[in-house]
Image (cartoon, coloured by chain):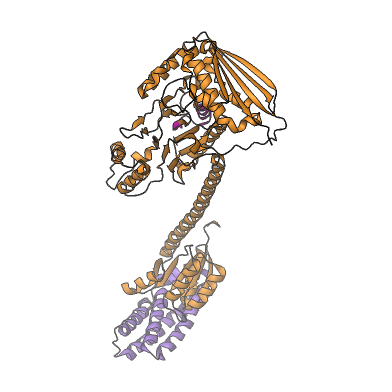
Chain colours: A purple, B orange
Amino acid sequence: MSDTHVDRKVLSDLQDVMEEGYINLLETFLEDSEARLRHLCSARSAEALGLEAHSFKGSASNMGAHQLAELCRQLEERINKHALYDVEHLIHQICREFLEVRQVFRDECKRVKVS
Amino acid sequence: MSAHDALTVLIVEDGATDRLLLATLVRKQGHRVLTAENGKLAVALFAEQRPQLVLLDAVMPVMDGFEAARQIKALAGEELVPIIFLTSLTEDAALVRCLEAGGDDFLAKPYSPVVLAAKIKAMDRLRRLQATVLEQRDQIALHHNHLLNEQRVAKAVFDQIAHAGCLSAPNIRYLQSPYALFNGDLLLAAFTPTGEMHVLLGDFTGHGLPAAVGAMPLAEVFYGMTAKGYGLAETLREMNAKLKRILPVDMFCCALLLNLSFERRVVEVWNGGMPDGYLLPAAGGEALPLVSRHLPLGVLSSERFDERTDVLPLALGDRLFLLTDGVVETCDENDQLFGVERLHRVFAENHDPAHLFEDVLLALEAFRGRSRDDVSLLEITVVAPEQVMPPPLVYSDSGQSSPLDWSLSFEFRAQTLKRFNPLPWLMQVLQEVHGLRTQSSALYSVLNELYSNALEHGVLQLDSALKRDAQGFTAYYQERNRRLQALDSGHIRLELRVEPWKGGGRLIIDVEDSGRGFDMSKLHGAPTVEQRLSGRGLNLVRRLSRHAEWSDGGRRARVEFAWDALA
C-alpha cells in the first residue's frame, strides 16, 4: 500500500544521501507541506494557487510522493488553462493524498529511530 | 575533492524541504553551501560572499528567480558565475525565459545527484575557461600597450637623430607616412658642410621594431659622416659595414643614395635594390631611370662591397624623383597593381613640372581602393646654389684658439690616390680657421675641383671632352675607375698656407700633379658661370676664389682665399 503513495526507492536513496539528516528531512517536509496546504486552501487568487501548486509539486516529487506530485501538477495545469471548474474537488484530493503520505513518513521516522 | 575543485555554491529555493535536500546533496559533493529562501536575499548574499555557482529556483516570492538571475549576472560583470535554474517548468516558453534572464542550465525536480554533479562540474569548467580568457585578454592588452610604448620611445629617439636633416629645403617635396619608421621606410637628407646635398631613400626588411632598430645606426652614420664632409663612397662603405655587422643574416636595407652638387651641377647615384628612381629633364622628354646596380646594404662583406657611383649631369630645373616599392605595388579593389607603366604614363602626361608631384599623388589616390602606409615619395628640383643655402653651422668654440699662421704640405702617391680621398680631412683642418667658415661651400668646391683635375686630367690623363653628354659622362667615369685601379705611378702635391694678411688673413692653396699639363692659353677673359658640362671647371675656381693662377705648363695651380678681421 505504501508503494502507491511513496516510491520506496526514492526514500532509500534519500536516506543514503541525508544519513543522519534523514529524519530531519522527513519532518521538514511534513511541516513545510502542512503550511503549503493551508496556503492552498486559503489562496486568494488563481495565480497564488498556481504558484503553491507548483512548489508543492516540486517538493513532493523530490520526496518520492509521486501521486501527490501528479495531483499538484493537474491543479497547476487547470489553473494555467483557466479551467477553474471543480478546483475545490482537486484540492480536497490533494489533502487526502497528503494524509496518506504523512502516515507513510511518520511510520518511516519510527522505523529509522528504532533501527 | 581537492581544495582547487571545491566551490562555494549559493542555493536559492523557497521550499524548506527542497532547500535542505539540495544543500545536503551539494555539500556531500564537496562544496561549501550558502542558502537563501528568496531572490532578494539571494542577491544580497551573492554580493557579500561572491559564490562561484548559483542554483536558483525559478518560481519564488519576493523577487522571483528571473529577476534574481538578472541582478546576479549584473553583479558578476565580466566573470562567468553559472546559474543553474531549479525548475519543474517544462514549457519551452518558460525555459526560454530562464535563458533570457541569464540562466546557463536547468536542473529538473526530482533532483538526481548524478545529474547535479555532472552539471556542476561542467559549469565549473566553463567558469574557469572564462576566467582564463579574461586573464589572457588582460595580459595581451598589457603587452600591446608595452609594445606601443616601446615604439613611441623608438620613434622619439629616431626623430632626435633625424632632426639634423634638410627635408624642409625649398626644393624638396616629399610624402612619408608617420608609420614609415616601422614599415622600414627611411628618408634622410642632409647638407654637407660645403653645400652639397646627400639624400637616402631606404627600405628595410621586416616590420615593427626590427625594421626601426636598423634604421637608427644607419641614420647616425649617414648624418654623422655627411656633417663631416665625407663623400658618398665612404659613407656607403661605412653604412654597409655597419649593417652587415649588426643585422641578422636575413635582414638588409635596400637603398638609393644621391649626392647632389648644385654648384657643379652633377649628381652621384647609388642604387642597391630600390625601384628605379627617375631623372626628369627640365626640357621635357624621356625620364632617365636610375636603375639598381648593386645589392642592398648589409648583404656583402666589406671586401666585396661596391661603392662605385654613377655620375650624371644636371641642368637647372631638372627633377629627381625617388619612390619606394609601395607606390608601384599599390593595389585597387581587384588586386591589380598600379605598376611601372602607369607611373610612366603620369610622367608622360604631365604638362606642368611644378605639378608633377601632385599628379603622381592624385593618380595613386584615384587608383587605390584603400590607403597604404608604406608609400614614400621624394622629388628634388635642381636649383641655383644660392637657393639652397644650408643653415649656418653652429660651432662650439669661440675662435680664440684659431690657428692663424701655419703651413701644411702633402704628397699623395699612386697607392694612396687609389684608396684615399683627402678632401673631408683637409676640410676638417680648414674648419679650424674661423675666418674661412663663411666660405666653406666655395672652399670645398674649389678644393674638389683642383683635386679632381689633378687626379683625373693630370695623373690619370683623362680627356674632359668625353663629358659632353650623359652617355659620355658614364663612359668617362667608367674609364676613370679603370685607370685608377691600374695606377702605379704619379703623385699629387698639396700645400696649404694660412697667414695673417691686411688685418685679417688668407689661405694659399697650391696643388701640383705629375701629369702633362694643359694649354694655358685657354685662360683669358673674365670668369663666367660655367655653362657647358665639360671643361676643367677653371672658371668655377676663378669665380669662387680671390685669386687663381696656373703655372708649370698647367701642372700647378695656386688659389687664394682671404678674410677680413673678425669682429
Observer-nearest of B294 and B63: B294
Question: Is residue B131 rendered to the left or right of residue B324?
Answer: right
Question: Is residue B433 rendered to the left or right of residue B489?
Answer: right
The answer to whether residue B195 is seen in the rendering is yes
Observer-nearest of B527 and B312: B527
Vertical position of residue B347 compared to residue B46: above or below: above
Observer-nearest of B121 and B297: B297
* Percent position of residue A29, x then y: 47, 79
Residue appearing at x 68%, y 25% in the figure: B501
Quadrant of the rendered image containing residue B345: top left
The range drawn in magenta is: B237-257
Quadrant of the rendered image containing residue B479: top left
Queried whether the magenta region covers residue B201, the answer comes back as no
The number of numbered badges drawn on the structure is 0
* Percent position of residue B440, x then y: 58, 30
* Percent position of residue B237, x then y: 51, 25
Quadrant of the rendered image containing residue B313: top left
Queried whether the magenta region covers residue B245, the answer comes back as yes
Work out which residue is located at the far front of the displayed protein and give it.
Answer: B525
Vertical position of residue B560 compared to residue A5: above or below: above
Q: Dividing the image into 4 quarters, which one contains the C terminus of chain B?
A: top right
Residue appearing at x 53%, y 29% in the figure: B242
Work out which residue is located at the far right of the displayed protein and give it.
Answer: B400
The answer to whether residue A110 is seen in the rendering is no
Work out which residue is located at the far top of the displayed protein and give it.
Answer: B489
